[in-house]
Image (tube, rainbow, N blue to C red):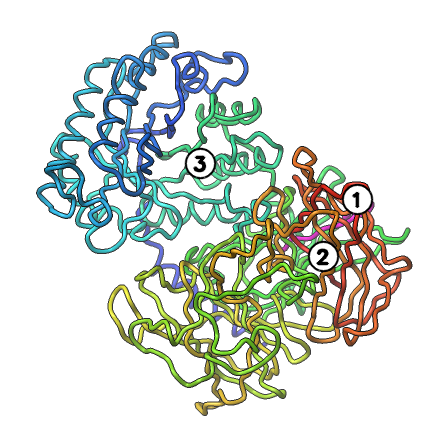
């Protein structure tokens, strides 16, 4: 009865909150923007009329159509012959080269576009062009020319006016082209002088009856303040195509939906992004889901920008070209994921959703789409699969996570991904999702649950986030903003975060430990806390900084994980380690300036625990001064000892190791499907990796994810021997032989695995990689090692 009353109260509260926040600007209309399909054309290379015919029609290896599929083209150059980058510092020499050589002239892009259009079907209107304006840098490029200094407002405006006038004069020479306006090259607009410069650009552009376009990245400074800066149309980048886990990022497919919702709220369009020209099945799947989401969330019918790379055609596969051509013609594209399925719901006593899985479906994950209706829900989500295993049918735990973190970047539209991996012999017959609520039953419908069929490149395991060491060592620690003691890197200890000193105002480097956001090195920043005994805690405070000065900013996400049974490395709850999660309940600015703030992240809750882990996703530098804990208002911070599970960001290594480790990559939960920051050594060397679970845990399955790229002499290890230990001294083979077997391949990631006949109790898990004499000159490249129950 009490649970029902709580749910009714929660319904009323969320309804009120929804009504308060329901006002949104909506996508810009095609009439307002003056374009529908705007493709970014990077002309750093050669774009002949013959090449542009294929590009403009979306054709691949043969001319599939003579219809131009874009109504607008944005012309961009990223680099000049004078070693300048147009999104950073340039001068008049760079601008003149672009205007005279790349834009105008006999073989300039305007001439080549016109020649291509002459050989295609006539369009109802001239093809619109938007021309980039290089970043106007008032600091590092003051000496724009011998007579103009970009630090001077009058000089800046003279330079901008000359540029826009020249662009306008050039385009007017080509009747088949019409100048829509100017594109801002920088994807963020930092506070202060850059805001002033943007308004100057806007005023000049508008004086020519032209418009100003901007395409910010997610969470860029001023991304949702664009209209106040005089920008006419803004398009928001999701970034998912380049930062999915298999690309060594952290965004799941829900990022595209979140971008669409944010764009609607703040009046932007959405950018379609293609990775590497969509040449592989995985990249085509990413593009397909961008396009499918456009129909689902409506941005297919709103002004859109297309980032397609710099290739001879709009994509590097016929299938991707066909998808884009169909999308621009208004056809809905089917997603790779499954949504709005007929789930069967029960709610006594736990909310559960169950569905039978067709033999044609290959589930890889379950994604939950949250909205303002679920804003204050906290609880555990567990995904189980009914599978055939050892000639019998059983319900098997596939994935588990705690929900409650606050992701400021996505506002109300965060998605929770529960990924899983199964052996090829294991077929899921049914899926069951259980929601264990701490306060309220979540208000979920069929629309909120998605079955992902694409590999996602991330899976939480018992060992996800656990510390490890490599023998011989491949990691050199040289922190930029480290702790006052090295003890907190290898065990629980007290240090800078418990010294009772912090800055309530501007950031001071001597008081902070710092981590920079680098998705390829650590998707999460984790600090474990040990109170020494089981005790009741009401509140944990984190003293930190924000405001963007020196790239120090508030994190995108912050949450607290707690347990009485073990040290929670991640939100994964294993068999003998239940974990609970709490969101950051408040973010308070305590002093400083608009761009250099001191403040508090507050986690207010009430529970009994011994261990806790603070988990963050940073946005620039995360600088932490102090961690405090309270019970009934009483400061109990003197009980805190902490362990930096994520080492503070190190300075660039100069030790000569070709593919060094970074101390966290191999247990961060991210599987790399492409070449990138990996831990690697030649097969003529031996290595041992020892994972420390810090407590005795139950282990039944171990995995190694290695890159396979034969053209580059990279192959999975021919032999991996797995052992476990309770004390780190006496080792027992894991399984009968301890030797791993070959599992599934995802993109260029190959899994090796070993499953024991019976679960094993262990604190340490060791992976031995012997010397391979047959291919000693080849490389072993690893992205992940894992152990789980």
Which circle's residue, 1 or 2, is located before the other in the chain?
2
Circle 3 sits in a helix, a strand or a loop, which is it? strand
Majority secondary structure of magenta residues: loop
Q: Residues within 10 Å of mark 1 (few under 14, many from 20)?
A: few
**Residue under numbered circle 3:** 272
- The quadrant in which residue 549 appears is bottom left
List x then y, in percent, for residue 467. Answer: 64, 67
Q: Position of residue 246 (x, y in %)?
A: 60, 46
Q: Quadrant of the N terminus?
A: bottom right
Q: Earlier in the sequence, mark 1 or mark 3?
A: 3
> For this view, does 241 lie left or right of residue 37?
right
Q: Mark 3 or mark 2: name the one nearer the start of the chain.
A: 3
**Image height check: is 638 above or below 99?**
below
The residue sitting at 41% across, 60% down in the picture is 408
Nearer to the camera, 236 or 241: 241
Image quadrant where one finds the C terminus: bottom right
Tell me where the magenta segment starts and ends, as one range: 418-429
Check disc 1 and report the residue beneath it. Answer: 424
Q: Secondary structure at mark 1?
A: loop
Residue 434 occupies which quadrant of the picture? bottom right
Q: Residue at x 24, y 55 (%)?
A: 191
Q: Is residue 65 above or below residue 770?
A: above
Verify CB contact (< 8 Å) between mark 1 and mark 2: no
Residue at the spot of label 2: 398
- In whole angstroms, how far apart are the C-alphas of marks 3 and 2? 32 Å
Q: At 73% from the left edge and 53% from the top edge, which residue is drawn?
A: 704
């Amino acid at each position: 009865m009490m649970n029902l009353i709580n749910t009714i109260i929660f319904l009323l509260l969320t309804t009120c909150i929804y009504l308060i926040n329901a006002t949104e600007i909506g996508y810009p209309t095609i009439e307002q923007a003056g374009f529908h399909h705007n493709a970014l054309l990077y002309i750093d290379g050669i774009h002949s009329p013959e090449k542009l015919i294929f590009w403009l029609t979306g054709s691949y290896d043969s001319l599939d159509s003579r219809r131009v599929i874009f109504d607008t083209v944005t012309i961009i150059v990223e680099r000049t012959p004078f070693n300048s980058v147009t999104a950073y510092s340039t001068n008049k020499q760079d601008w003149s080269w672009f205007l005279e050589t790349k834009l105008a002239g006999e073989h300039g892009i305007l001439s080549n576009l016109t020649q291509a259009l002459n050989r295609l079907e006539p369009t109802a209107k001239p093809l619109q062009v938007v021309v980039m304006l290089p970043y106007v840098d008032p600091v590092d490029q003051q000496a724009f020319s011998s007579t103009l200094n970009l630090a001077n407002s009058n000089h800046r405006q003279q330079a901008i006016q000359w540029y826009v006038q020249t662009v306008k004069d050039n385009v007017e020479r080509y009747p088949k082209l019409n100048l829509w306006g100017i594109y801002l090259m920088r994807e963020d607009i930092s506070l202060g002088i850059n805001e002033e410069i943007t308004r100057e650009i806007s005023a000049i552009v508008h004086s020519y009856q032209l418009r100003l376009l901007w395409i910010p990245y997610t969470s860029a400074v001023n991304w949702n303040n664009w209209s106040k800066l005089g920008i006419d149309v803004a398009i928001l980048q999701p970034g998912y195509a380049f930062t999915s886990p298999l690309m060594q990022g952290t965004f799941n497919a829900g990022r595209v939906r979140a971008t669409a919702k944010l764009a609607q709220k703040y009046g932007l369009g959405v950018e379609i992004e293609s990775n590497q020209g969509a040449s592989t099945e995985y990249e085509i799947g990413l593009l397909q889901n961008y396009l499918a989401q456009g129909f689902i969330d409506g941005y297919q019918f709103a002004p859109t920008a297309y980032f397609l790379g710099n290739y001879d055609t709009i994509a590097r596969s016929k299938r991707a070209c066909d998808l884009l051509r169909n999308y621009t013609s208004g056809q809905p594209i089917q997603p790779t994921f499954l949504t709005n399925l007929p789930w069967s719901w029960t709610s006594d006593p736990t909310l559960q959703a169950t569905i039978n899985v067709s033999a044609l479906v290959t589930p890889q994950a379950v994604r939950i789409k949250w909205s303002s209706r679920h804003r204050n829900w906290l609880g555990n989500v567990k995904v189980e699969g009914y599978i055939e295993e050892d000639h019998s049918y059983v319900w098997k735990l596939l994935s588990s996570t705690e929900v409650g973190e606050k992701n400021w970047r996505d506002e109300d539209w965060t998605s929770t991904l529960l990924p899983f991996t199964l052996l090829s012999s294991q077929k899921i017959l049914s899926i069951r999702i259980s929601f264990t609520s701490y306060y309220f039953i979540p208000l979920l419908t069929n629309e909120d649950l998605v079955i992902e069929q694409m590999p996602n490149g991330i899976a939480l395991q018992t060992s996800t986030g656990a510390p490890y060491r490599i023998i011989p060592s491949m990691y050199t620690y040289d922190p930029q903003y480290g702790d006052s003691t090295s003890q907190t890197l290898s065990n629980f200890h007290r240090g800078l975060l418990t010294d009772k000193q912090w800055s309530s105002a501007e950031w001071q480097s001597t008081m902070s430990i710092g981590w920079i956001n680098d998705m390829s090195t650590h998707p999460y920043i984790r600090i474990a806390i040990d109170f020494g005994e089981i005790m009741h805690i009401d509140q944990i405070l984190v003293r930190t900084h924000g405001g963007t000065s020196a790239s120090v900013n508030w994190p995108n996400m912050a949450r607290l994980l707690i347990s009485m049974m073990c040290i929670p490395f991640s939100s994964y709850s294993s068999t003998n380690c239940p974990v609970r999660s709490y969101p950051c309940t408040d973010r308070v600015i305590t002093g400083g300036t608009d761009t250099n703030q001191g403040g508090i992240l507050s986690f207010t809750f009430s529970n009994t625990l011994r261990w806790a882990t603070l988990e963050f996703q940073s946005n620039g530098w995360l600088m932490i001064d102090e961690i405090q804990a309270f019970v009934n208002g009483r400061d109990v911070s003197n009980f805190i000892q902490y362990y930096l599970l994520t080492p503070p960001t190190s300075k660039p290594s100069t030790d000569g190791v070709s593919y060094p480790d970074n101390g966290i990559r191999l247990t961060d939960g991210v599987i790399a499907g492409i070449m990138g920051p990996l831990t690697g050594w030649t097969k003529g060397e031996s290595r041992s990796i020892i994972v420390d679970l810090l407590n005795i845990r139950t282990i039944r399955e171990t995995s190694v994810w290695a890159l396979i790229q034969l053209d580059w002499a990279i192959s999975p290890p021919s032999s991996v021997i797995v052992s476990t230990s309770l004390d780190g001294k006496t080792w027992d083979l894991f399984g009968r032989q301890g030797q791993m077997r070959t599992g599934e391949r995802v993109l260029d990631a190959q899994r090796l695995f070993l499953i024991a006949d019976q679960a094993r109790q262990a604190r340490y898990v060791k992976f031995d990689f012997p010397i391979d004499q047959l291919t000693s000159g080849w490389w072993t490249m690893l992205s992940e090692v894992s152990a789980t129950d």
